[in-house]
Each structure stands twice: as structure tokens, then as C-alpha cells.
Amino acid sequence: MTSQNNPQKKFLIAFLVVVALLPALPIPEYWITLLNYIGLAALATLGLVLLTGVGGMTSFGQAAFVGVGAYTTAYLTTQLGASPWIALLAGLLITAIAALAIGMISMRLSGHYLPLGTIAWGLALYFLFGNFEFLGKYDGINDIPALTLAGISLQSSRAMYCLIWAILMVAILSVTNVLRSRPGRAMRALKSGKLMPEAMGVDTAWLKVMMFVYAALLACVSGWLYAHLQRAVNPTPFGINIGIEYLFMAVVGGAGYVWGAILGATVFTVLKDVLQSVLPKLLGASGNFEIIVFGILLLLLLRHARDGLWPLLRGLFPAAPPVHAPDSAEALPQRVKPQAGALILQVDSARKQFGGLVAVNNVSFDVRAGEIIGLIGPNGAGKSTTFNLVTGVLPVTSGEVRFCGESISGLASREIVKRGIARTFQHVHLVAGMSVLENVAIGGHLRSDFRPQGGIIASMLCLNRNEEAKLLHEAKRQLIRVGLGDRLHDDASSLALGQQRILEVARALCCDPSLLLLDEPAAGLRYQEKEALAGLLRKLRSEGMSILLVEHDMDFVMHLTDRLVVMEFGTKISEGTPQHVQNDPVVLEAYLGGVD
Ligand SMILES: Nc1ncnc2c1ncn2[C@@H]1O[C@H](COP(=O)(O)OP(=O)(O)OP(=O)(O)O)[C@@H](O)[C@H]1O
């Protein structure tokens, strides 16, 4: 541990001591009960932080999974006499299966269809609880036994407080561990869309389902605790309006921050409690007036503090230490690179039609190992479309793309990067709020000992230290290689555009590619930045890297590339050395409208 993280550690220890000592202090029972409900709500909200705040997937159905946990233990303990701890395992299993099934359908929805989908299954589960005879219909199930742990009864609310907050702290720690590791970096990358994470080898659809299951399991534990605290369940606390309340807590606390779950749950629960007792007295009538106040507060919050309250308070607390790369670590395995001059990429009569428009018309060219090839042409010539055919963003209409002799036509981006083609983007795709080092580490997503689910579980339990050390060390090595070794811990979005593009090259290098594909790397760069980028690409070529770049900047490509492929109206019109292309009348005609 460095001295840098000592204040953070001290703050955390102080917080944990306060949380642990609270039940021993002469605090009124009422406050302990309120703290219990805050803890339960924070646990369910933590799942939404992961799902909505980190992953960008809005769910109104979180309360339904709280219900699954609560009803499973209520039924098994009262009707079958099962131990509550066995019932917890059963609840987790049922939740995992249900969330897997629901997630596989709803996580594929995008835009407003996803929240609508979550409302649909949230309502469905609510009515299921209320209509099954064996679950007591709308009356629910009573006489749920109190929990016992190692022979000690947890009947009192102070005893339940200890269990609820201990579980909440473990959950916070597990989510924090995940978010600071390989699968967590992929999760954090999801918010900006799936294009970049898929290009780094992330199976985004599966990762979203895993996040959904993780969030549902947290809700299930909250429901299990609720049932044994309340000793009775009915469908009301698991309805869609409570799902909206959890979402409200996540937004109020700060949907992108794990500690925002506790803050949001505290603010909401306390405010609701106060408003429910004050407003009827003030207005002289009974009713759910607090909902009107919450609506107004939410509007004000979204207007003035979109990221919730936690970012406003965060400055008062010591910052979390940045993720560090170790000075030495075992090297990650590297693929065997093709011999210099070997044919690695063959674009063979590739054609792409968008309806009646032929964007790429039977284009053929090759790339050999150790070459820099430029793909140029006027606006609308079909360069980006060709780039997308090679990187798997678009499928070819006809023709073939082969990499190292294997056909890659029709493969998804994440399959193509697996084979050794890594890319950068015309409009840089970096994860804001994440350090330069962690952004580059996303490139090493596939270079892991763990498969996706295994990776999440290993990260939760801190079993991934060795893997993380190797990965972060590799990211640091690539950053030093491209000349950004002194910016490791800066926020990636604080870099100048030229450095951001170089960062993208480092991230692509972290994929261990045989071929680098760069989409307009010089776009928007100043002269010195272009010089620095060209110098880096020459250095990579001298180290044996093959590079294919799409570019508009003639000066940049003429001084850098070994060969150029020129396109116009979707067709290849010339190919050869920069000198040859520069003097080709067909090219001059395309660019300047004639040799004169
Ligand atoms: N998804 C799409 N749907 C329909 N038409 C498209 C699509 N993508 C590209 N096109 C069309 O295909 C043609 C080639 O576009 P493309 O973006 O590949 O050209 P480009 O050479 O990269 O141009 P620029 O240099 O301006 O980016 C254009 O006429 C464009 O409008």
C-alpha cells in the first residue's frame, strides 16, 4: 500500500467502525429500524448502480427480484420448514435462473424498449406473487422465522442491523473489486455503446446479461433479509412503484458510484419518512403527498446535478487510489507474428451494397507483414465501408476478406480481434473518468486466464491479483512503447486529441495484434501531433508491425506509407507506391478534376 491511499483507508476504517458501533450506542429503536431499511434499499440499489449507472441499462424491475428472494425464503421456511440459509441458496439459484432467462431476452433490447421490457416483467412477477394460492395471494405469507447465526438468534432489529450492514459492506466491496478489474473495465466501457468494447473482444451481449444477473442476485439477498426482518411478506413492496423508487435512489445518490447507493437510499428513506409524517399535518389531509415532492426534487436534481449527490460530496472524502501497474510482472503470452513480407490480409473482390447504393464495388488489395498501407480517396469513396468490412462491423455483400489465409468475412468484431486485427476509431472511443492505464488495459480483455463469468467471480473474491498484475503491466509497457509512460494515471479525457489517438494505438497494441487498422488517425491533429503520430507508426513498422490506415491527409500518407490503395465511387482506381499514385493521371482526375 502506498502512502497515497492511507487517507482513503483511514476514512473507510472510520466509517466501518461507526457502522459497527451504532447498534451498541443508546440510539432509539426507531432509528435502528430506519437504518435497517436503508441498508436493504442500498443493497437493491447497488444492483441498479451496476446495471444502470455503470452499464447504462435502465431497469424498473429490480423490486421484482427482491420479491423472488423474499418469497422463496418465506415459502421454504414456513411451508417446508427449511433453514433460512438453505432458502437463501435456493433463492439465489431461482433468481440466477430467472434473471438469466429474462436477461437474455431483455438485455438485447435497446433504447426505450429496454425500460419498457423491464416494466413488463416487473409487473408480471408482481402479479405472479399476488395470484398464486401457495404464496398466499395478496395477503402474502406470515410467521416467517427469525434468522439464527451460529446458534445466536437475530430476532432483534439491532441484531438484524449487524447482519444487513455486514452484507451490504461485503457487497460494496465485491462490486468495487469487480469494477476495478478486467470485466469491470469492460462493463464501464459499455455506457458509450458496444462498438469499442466489441472491437476489443468483449462479448457485450453476454456481459450485459451477467451484469443483470449480478444486480438481480443483490436484490434477492435484500429480499431474503427483508423477509426475515419483517417476518411477513406480501406483494406490495415488490411492485413496479418500488422499482421506480430504487431507480430514484440510484439517481439521487449518483448512479455511477457504488457509495451513491448508500447515499441515495439514506436520503430517500429519511426524506420519505419525514415527509410522510410532516406533509399530512401541514396539509390537513392524508395521502401520498411525498410522491409529488419527490417528483419535483427529481426534476431539480436532473436539472442541476445529473450525476447525483455523491459527486458533490466526494470532494469531502479522500480520493480512491489510482489503479497502479506493478514494476514487474510475468509477461502475457504473445501470438506468433507472421514473417516480414508474408501475405496477411487479402481483400478479394469485396462488395458492399446498401440497398441500391454500391458503397464498395469488388475491391481487391493485399497487405503484407511489416508494411504500412494507406487507403485513400475523396469523400464518399467507400474507404470507411471497406474498413468496416475488414473489422467485422459490416458483413460483405459478396467477395471475401482473408486474414493469414483464413476467411474472416461475416465474423463479428470480437472474433476478428481474437485472430490478431486490432483497430482505432475515427472519433476516439475512450472511457471518460477512467485512467489512461485502465483504458489501455481494456485492449487486453481477451488475454486472460478467466472466461467472462469466471472473471467476474474471481474479481469479486480478489482471486484475480496475478491476472491483473500481468494485464496492467502489459498496458503500462504499451504506453511506454508509444511514449505516454508519464501519463499513466491521468484521466484519459484530459489528454489532447493527438495523445488520445496515440492512447488508442496503445490500446490496440495491448490486443497483441499482427495487423493494426487505423481509421483516419491524423484527423483533427495539429502539425506536431501528426509528426509525433507518424514517428510512432514508423517505429512500430520497424518493430515488424503491419498497418492499414484510412486517411484523408495526403501529406501524412505520402510521407509515411509503403503503398497506397486509391478508391473513388466505391471502386479501386489506383494502387502503388506514393510516388506512383501521386503521378497517376486517374488519381489526379479524381482529386483535382484533371492533370492540368
Ligand atoms: N450504413 C450506410 N447506409 C447507407 N449508405 C451508406 C452507409 N454507410 C455508408 N454509406 C454510403 O456509402 C458511400 C461510401 O461511404 P463511406 O463512408 O465508406 O465513404 P468514405 O470514403 O469513408 O467517405 P469519408 O471520407 O467522407 O468518410 C457513401 O455514399 C455513403 O453515403
Image (cartoon, rainbow, N blue to C red):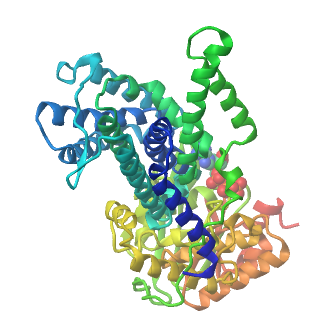
Q: Is residue 356 visible?
A: no
Residue 197 in the image: above or below residue 100: below
Which residue is more in the foreground, 347 or 229? Answer: 229
- Looking at the image, the residue that sits furthest to the front is 26
Give the left or right position of residue 506, taking residue 128 as reference.
Answer: right
Q: Give the image location of residue 487, x and y in percent.
A: 69, 78
Q: How many marks?
A: 0
Q: Is residue 220 visible?
A: yes
Q: Residue at x 62, y 40 (%)?
A: 252
Residue 358 in the image: above or below residue 30: below
Quarter of the figure with the C terminus: bottom right
Q: Give the image location of residue 101, x and y in percent.
A: 29, 40
Residue 406 in the image: above or below residue 300: below
- Looking at the image, the residue that sits furthest to the right is 596
Which residue is more in the foreground, 214 or 477? Answer: 214
- Looking at the image, the residue that sits furthest to the top is 285
Residue 296 found in image quarter: top right
Quarter of the figure with the N terminus: bottom right
Give the left or right position of residue 574, taking residue 110 as reference.
Answer: right
Q: Residue at x 48, y 44 (%)?
A: 42
Give the left or right position of residue 73, taking residue 309 as reference.
Answer: left
Q: Give the image location of residue 131, x and y in percent.
A: 25, 17
Q: Residue at x 71, y 59 (%)?
A: 315
Q: Give the image location of residue 378, x and y in percent.
A: 74, 59
